[in-house]
Image: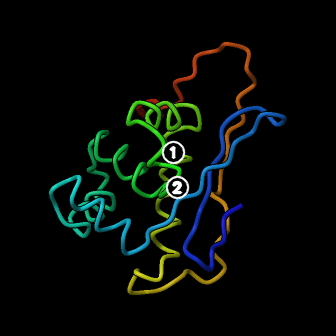
Amino acid sequence: MANSKRGEASFFVGEKKDRKDYTLRFSLNTLCDLEESLGKSFTVVYAGWAEGNISISEFRETVKAALGAQGKELSREDVGNLIEEAGFEVVMDALMTAFENSALNQNGPREGAPADPPRAVEMDGTGTDSSTMPSPQG
């Protein structure tokens, strides 16, 4: 379970009995690792999020870095599969919450910020389409 006082946020995948939680956190080392892997500063990456302009590969790499030790055990493909299983929006909400709750955020933790992302998705294991990318509005 995520600890918002430490700047953590979580999402989960799987059915209730097989549920696996994943915790995201932006520590100083996480941000340094992310900058090195992306070849650009985190402020540029975060500005892209705010503008809705982040590539899918940057998003996946950011999730991998924010997973910390859990992410180091996973391949990029594994992280992509987690994002698909949990849902793009759910994971993005968790990432934003983790950064907003981070001590590295100049504004500090949000008052009353939830420990978990606002939405969660449970997979029913029925073999339905696992792609949960949001559909275009229109």
Which quadrant: the C terminus? Answer: top left
Q: Nearer the viewer, residue 75 or 26?
A: 75
**How far across and down, in percent of the image, does residue 34 sit?**
29, 59
Looking at the image, the residue that sits furthest to the right is 17
Q: Residue furthest top?
A: 127
- Where residue 95 appears, as percent x and y from the top left, is 48, 58
Q: Is residue 101 left or right of residue 22?
A: left
Q: Name the quadrant of the N terminus.
A: bottom right
Residue ID at (65%, 57%): 118
Label 1 crowd (10 A; few <14 / some 14-19 / many >=20): some
Which residue lies most toward the bottom here? 107
Looking at the image, which residue is at 38% across and 86% down? 106
Instruction: Check whether the beta carbons of the residues at disc 2 and disc 1 lie within 8 A of each other.
Output: yes
Q: Nearer the viewer, residue 135 or 10?
A: 10
Specify the farthest residue to the left: 39
Is 59 left, or right, of 125 in this rendering?
A: left
Spot occupied by residue 18 in the image (x, y as percentages of width and height): 78, 34
Tell me the distance, in whole angstroms, between the alpha carbons under discs 2 and 1: 6 Å
Q: Which residue is mark 2?
A: 93
Amino acid found under the numbered disc labelled 1: Glu
User: How does the figure colour the protein chain or chains?
Assistant: rainbow
What residue is shown with label 1? 89
How crowded is the residue under tag 2: few (<14 C-alpha within 10 Å), some, or many (20+)? some
The secondary structure type at the circle numbered 1 is: helix
Residue 67's tag is: none
Q: In the image, what residue type sits under mark 2?
A: Asp
Q: Is residue 29 above or below residue 127?
A: below
Q: Residue at x 48, y 76 (%)?
A: 102
- Residue 84 screen position, x and y as percent: 51, 31
Against 18, residue 92 (above or below) is below
Q: Is residue 21 left or right of residue 79?
A: right
